[in-house]
Structures are given as structure tokens and as C-alpha cells.
Image (cartoon, grey):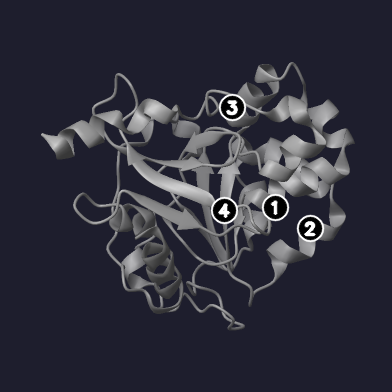
Amino acid sequence: MRMRMRMRMRMRMTTCVWGLAACLVAAVVFGPGCAPSMAQDVSKAPEDYNIRKDECIFEDRKEFLLDQAKGNDDFSTLVKALESVPDLIPIFENKKDKLTILAPTNEAFATFFKDFNSSAEEFLKDKNLVKLVLSYHVIPSVVPYSDMEMALKPLFMSQVGVTTSVPGDDLSLTRVKPAGKDEYVIRSAGYASAAYLSPDSVWACNGVINPINYVLVPRQATITKPSLRIANGGSGGNPKDGDDEKKDKEG
């Protein structure tokens, strides 16, 4: 079943089978700082998102992904990390190769560093680790929040697998209700941590940025740096977060 869903998600990346826009309340898991300056009507996007074409997704969005991140103060730590690995920069400035970035906010990085008694300065010293972790947050296609939510609608799919730019290390998307909250949100689970996504997708010429509230850790990173193993799934989520939805379906 999950394999079929992956195939359908990949089809959506190029044919826009799911084009319905959707929105949850960002305050569920995020502060107001990560909201984009102007909402974008996803229904007006080309069906193929202009993937592999030398054209912007939206004519009025000429800024590249890196430019959009630089223009948002809440992504300053992410920008520093990207700029610390110069060979990654061209990837985010290529008009043909459309991408999706699951972008940890400054608060997400701060929580991550606190969990491991580290800092941005300490993290940036290990260029190989930075490159690996950042690559894990890049989906090599266009997958805005609205597409994810549509794929995870009740009675359709409970889990979706998403390919990342780290070979063999996929992410799992689920629709969950965080403890103490009334609204469902999308949770992205990596090998060693998880994060909640904000519904406020930030569009760029060559892709989309989906803010997240924790740093995702790929399996390879836990091998080279065992201290990055997180037993409880990370501050962005807990393995039990989906229990409420399961009970709703069973009921």
C-alpha cells in the first residue's frame, strides 16, 4: 500500500493530480515568525510545476529558494548552514531543477542544539555533517503542504513515503494530532528525529519551502555521529502522536 502511495506522490509531482489548496492554523506548532509575506494561490500553478523547464513556477516569483530563505529572518541559521557548504549553493539557484526544502526555523535549530548540548558554531565546524543533514531536508521535486495534506486526507492514506536527496534515506509523512491540540498537522519523520510542518509554504521561482519545527537526522549521520540518535523521535514529534487519529478511525 505504501509503495502505491509513493508512486502516486511521484505522479503528483509531475502531473498535479492533487491540486487542492488547504490550510491549518500555523499557531498549532509554530509562532507567527515563519509565515510568508504573501500567500500564493497554488491552484494557479502549472500542472507540472514547470519541473525540468527553464521557467519559474509562478511568473511573479522570480527569487530563487536561497533568496527567499535569506529574505526571512526566521531562516537565518539555515542560511548560515547552507553558506558554510559552498558546493550546495548552485543546487538552490538552478531554475530547471525544482526542489522542496523542509526548512528548520531558527527556533527549530535552537531546540536541536539544546537537545545535544551543542551550538550553531559547533555544528558548522563539521562540513560533512552539515552537508548530509541539509541534503536530508531537500526533496528533489515540488511538494507543497497542500499536496501533502490532500494525500493524507482521512480514508485515503495514513502514511506517505517521500524521497530525499540522501540516497536510501526517505522520510515518512503522517497526519497527527499533537498532544493537547485540537487540530491535525503533518509530521515528517526521519530516521532519528521528527518535525511538524507549518502549512505556510513559501514559494520561490525554483521550488517551495515548507517550514518545520525540528531538525531531521538521517541514518548515515547517526553512524558517523552516534550521539545524534534520538530515542523519542525528536522534539518535533513522538511515535504516539498518531494514536488520536487511529482511535478516531477505529471508533
Q: Earlier in the sequence, mark 2 or mark 1?
A: 2
Q: Earlier in the sequence, mark 4 or mark 1?
A: 1
Q: Around disc 4, counting alpha carbons within 10 Å, would you say few (fewer than 14), some (14 to 19), or many (20 or more)?
A: some
In the rendered image, residue 49, in percent from the top left (x then y), is placed at 47, 74
What is the CA distance from the residue labelled 4 to the residue labelled 1? 11 Å
Q: Which residue is mark 3?
A: 107
93 or 97: nearer the viewer: 97
Q: Quadrant of residue 175?
A: top left
Q: Which residue is mark 1?
A: 135
Q: Quadrant of the C terminus?
A: top left
Indicate the amino acid at tag 3: Glu
Q: Is residue 28 visible?
A: no
Pointers 1 and 3 in contact (CB under 8 A)?
Answer: no
Pointers 2 and 4 in contact (CB under 8 A)?
Answer: no
* Mark 4 residue element: loop
Q: Earlier in the sequence, mark 4 or mark 3?
A: 3
Indicate the amino acid at tag 2: Leu
In the rendered image, residue 174, in percent from the top left (x then y), is placed at 38, 44
* Mark 1 residue element: helix
Q: Which residue is mark 4?
A: 170
Pointers 2 and 1 in contact (CB under 8 A)?
Answer: yes
